[in-house]
Image: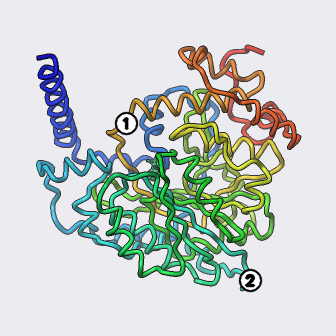
Amino acid sequence: MKNNIIQYLSYASIILWIWTALLFIYFHPNYGNQQKRVQKPESTWSLEKQVNQQDTNGPEQKPKPYLKDERSDEAEHKEQKPFIKFPLNYSDLELIHGLLKYGFNIIISRSLGKERDVPDTRNKMCLKQHYPKYLPTASVVICFHNEEFNALFRTMSSVMNLTPQYILEEIILVDDMSEFDDLKEKLDYHLEVFRGKIKLIRNKKREGLIRSRLIGASHASGDVLVFLDSHSEVNRVWLEPLLFAISKNPKMVVCPVIDVIDNMTLEYTPSPVVRGTFNWKLQFMWDNIFSYEMEGPEGPTAPVRSPAMAGGIFAIDRHYFYEIGQYDKGMNLWGGENLELSLRIWMCGGQLFIIPCSRVGHISKEHFQNNFTTMKSLAYNNLRVVHVWLDEYKEQFFLQRPDLKSMKYGNISERVQLRKRLGCKSFQWYLDTVFLELEATVNTL
Ligand code: UDP
Ligand code: MN
């Protein structure tokens, strides 16, 4: 009897979920498009972004926005024909099912197949850039967990098609214990076309994205590690600007501009050049860049200083990655690692820049599944960031998140040791030098 009730309840909750999703999509058919109109691009960490939209505690003093259109050719983009040639049918159960399972429109993803062309979204000035013949080589690390087959494949095809072979050491695919059938033998079979360039590693248990990236990195032999999400598509000449920046300064960690691939239409659209920041809740946010950043001789192609990185898409010198302590292995499934690495880079002698001439598209997924587990791991990971890196400013975080004050965050002694060993600067230094706009809301010092 009790089992029956539980069974009925779980059926009822699944049906309720599907109806909520159906109603949501029915009443917000342009949801993705509306978001695109906002000046800022989708965050790689879309879950956090959804929270950010309700957040009014962003930095009060906004930097002066860069007003000129920095994109390659606005008119050219506007004239592009609509990407989707058939109307979307939002009552399609397959669509809803796919959306709940993968976080984006799998019908369109399947129709696009394993590779496609995306529009060149670079500023025109980027086309005049020349890069040296000898650049460091790159190992591209792509971790995936239950990814949609075609989106995963497009990630790899775009890398293979748009990267000169002599700088692409390898692609390292890490399967973080996916359960879906098409990611097993079928994937092995289709990967044969990339033979010689691809290494596939399958985790024996679910490790989460942080440890999976570390596993991927441990198999890499290229000079530079490039991390990509498993639903990305790189753009033309995406890798050379990243490698060139690192070749000049191996302590420079670089991110491409993250273009938006709409989760409903899968249309690839350019993002403005922005920098990564965060608030006292440690929520990642995009922010306008200072106009002076683009007023130098390099104009809109100049690297942009960024207080933080969005997450999954960046390049780092492989030896430097180990020198500064990789990732915090004590972190769980998802989230927070981007801010931890960003703070560590700046505070321990490195630099973090966004390179406008390098562009990579990313599907801004809707996370319907595992929200609770994900949010819990994000809170846990953020606490580790707070206790290792924020010094006396940790009170600013707890003012915003008093609920997390007594939550456990594991053993951080190794990371505290690392900070000492690297002789890292204080969080005060970071605020004074790198992220001046993050102001303490209440004086707790
Ligand atoms: N991922 C993983 N293991 C996990 C969670 C995520 O390998 O436990 C992968 C995921 O497939 C993706 C990347 O890590 O390639 C980043 O996660 P996700 O795209 O879900 O984050 P988002 O960009 O949507 O915020
Ligand atoms: Mn992603």
Q: Position of residue 66 (x, y in %)?
A: 60, 53
Mark 2 or mark 1: which is in front? 1
Between 445 and 389, the one nearer to me in the picture: 389
Looking at the image, is 120 positioned above or below residue 214?
Answer: below
**Residue at position x 41%, y 75% in the image:** 191
Between 248 and 170, the one nearer to me in the picture: 170
Looking at the image, is 128 positioned above or below residue 93?
Answer: below
Alpha carbon separation for disc pair 2 and 1 = 45 Å
Whether residue 404 is visible here, answered yes or no, is: yes
Tag 1's secondary structure? loop
Looking at the image, is 145 positioned above or below residue 335?
Answer: below
Q: Do callouts 2 and 1 mark residues in contact (Cβ within 8 Å)?
A: no
**Residue at position x 28%, y 63% in the image:** 109
Which residue, given by chain and number where applicable, does mark 1 sit on?
A: 370
Between 169 and 344, the one nearer to me in the picture: 169
- The amino acid on which the numbered mark 2 sits, given as a three-letter code, is Tyr
Whether residue 39 is visible here, answered yes or no, is: no
259 left or right of 435 in image = left
| Quadrant of the snapshot with the N terminus | top left
262 left or right of 211 in image = left
- The amino acid on which the numbered mark 1 sits, given as a three-letter code, is Asn
Tag 2's secondary structure? loop
Q: Position of residue 372 (x, y in %)?
A: 40, 29
